[in-house]
Image (tube, rainbow, N blue to C red):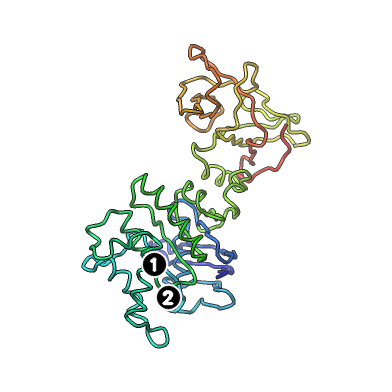
Amino acid sequence: MKVTLQNLTKIFPSRDKKSGKEVVAVNDFTFEIPDGKLIGLLGPSGCGKSTTLYMISGLQKPTAGRIFFGDDDVTELSTENRGIGLVFQNYALYPHMSVKQNILFPLQNLKGKDKMTKNEMLERAYEAARLVQIDELMDRKPSELSGGQQQRVAIARALVKMPRVLLLDEPLSNLDARLRLQTREEIRRIQKETGITTVFVTHDQEEAMSISDMIVVMKLGVVQQIGKPQEVYDNPTNLFVAKFLGTPPINVFNGNITGGKLYIGEEAVMDVPGVEDQAVTVGIRPEGFELADDGKLTCNLSNVEVMGRDVSVVSTNDASVNPVIRSIINADNKIDLSQTTVRFNLKPHKVFIFNAETEERLYVEVK
């Protein structure tokens, strides 16, 4: 099911009676979610991602704009008539009901032509349970399940109605690190098996990048960038996107372009021919450093953290915006810890230059 958002806007009234200033939670969001794809809505708290999800679900009505499921305008349609499956952060399971009863509940409320027989409902419930691999737990109560198992019950309950669109609101937030990894892999498997168009809301960029076909990065209600995860990582449109994606985060420096060269501090680290002189902000991905005795960028060596096949060189530089610089290099490189400095050359495709004032990307040739 293709989902189309046209100029979607949501404005909440001000809570501050003195200022009377309205809160724009989502601002003119236009996007077409392709049929059968998993889309990650990504951004920090307050960016408007959950509000967008709730407007798609019908739980909140947009201030302006339209929502289409396929060719159907569902903007004014009630939640129960949109054909959506919704999974909340807190699972929202009925504690007094068994797993089977929780999964059956949405089917028992179907009316008219959609009403099903008892056998049809049971068959559908077990089919959903098998899909999320909890069919052996059907007689247990939610309190007898682990957090990951409860999340699977919530997903099965959302899938049992065979929704046109599946909506997941921070579904992994309450799980520990290992369960998060396992469950996000399960969500991806289930989505591929069912082919249901899915919208996944998260503030965790690693989650979004690992399972999404496309990600939408948001900030203060405004879409910053849309694209395939790797494309957005490799080509951020502005400093916010560059900083939000990546673990460890991108290293940011104050820099200058003078005479066709990019300077970090007093050192000319790269050639940028044909670019006018100006102050810039420079972003360098951790994997964008190459250790070299005659490297163009000199940093003060703090520590070396061994990570197996790679090592993380921790250093500082007066021009760095970050407290420390993290450079990921191959563990075959030997670093003399008795030295006070370390020198790097930079990989051009891992270096991004931004306007110092607007923080928008400057698409310049770096050598």
Identity of the amino acid at label 2?
Thr
Quadrant of res 161: bottom left
Which amino acid lies under the numbered mark 1 shown in the image of this protein?
Answer: Ala
- Residue 51 vs residue 84, the one in the foreground: 84
- Provide the secondary structure element on which disc 2 rests: helix
Q: CA distance from mark 2 to mark 1?
A: 21 Å
- Closer to the N terminus: mark 2 or mark 1? 2
The residue labelled by disc 1 is 128
Q: Relative to residue 62, is residue 34 drawn left or right?
A: right
Residue linked to disc 2: 79
Instruction: Specify the quadrant that holds the C terminus.
Output: top right
Crowd rating for badge 2 (residues with CA inside 10 Å; few <14, some 14–19, many 20+): some
How dense is the environment of label 1, judged by Cα within 10 Å: few (below 14), some, or many (20 and up)? Answer: many
Task: Work out whether 294 lies above or below 63.
Answer: above
**Relative to residue 204, is residue 277 drawn left or right?**
right
Q: For the residues carrying marks 2 and 1, which lies nearer the camera in this image?
A: 1
Where the N terminus falls, by quadrant?
Answer: bottom right
Task: Return the x and y of residue 302 as percentages of the image width and height.
Answer: 47, 21
When the figure is inspected, residue 123 is found, relative to residue 111, above or below; the finding is: above
Left or right, 48 with reference to 132: right
Residue 130: where, in percent of width, then height? 38, 63
Total marks shown come to 2
Q: Is residue 197 above or below residue 41?
A: below
Residue 64 pos. (x, y %): 53, 72
State the residue lying farthest toward the top: 338
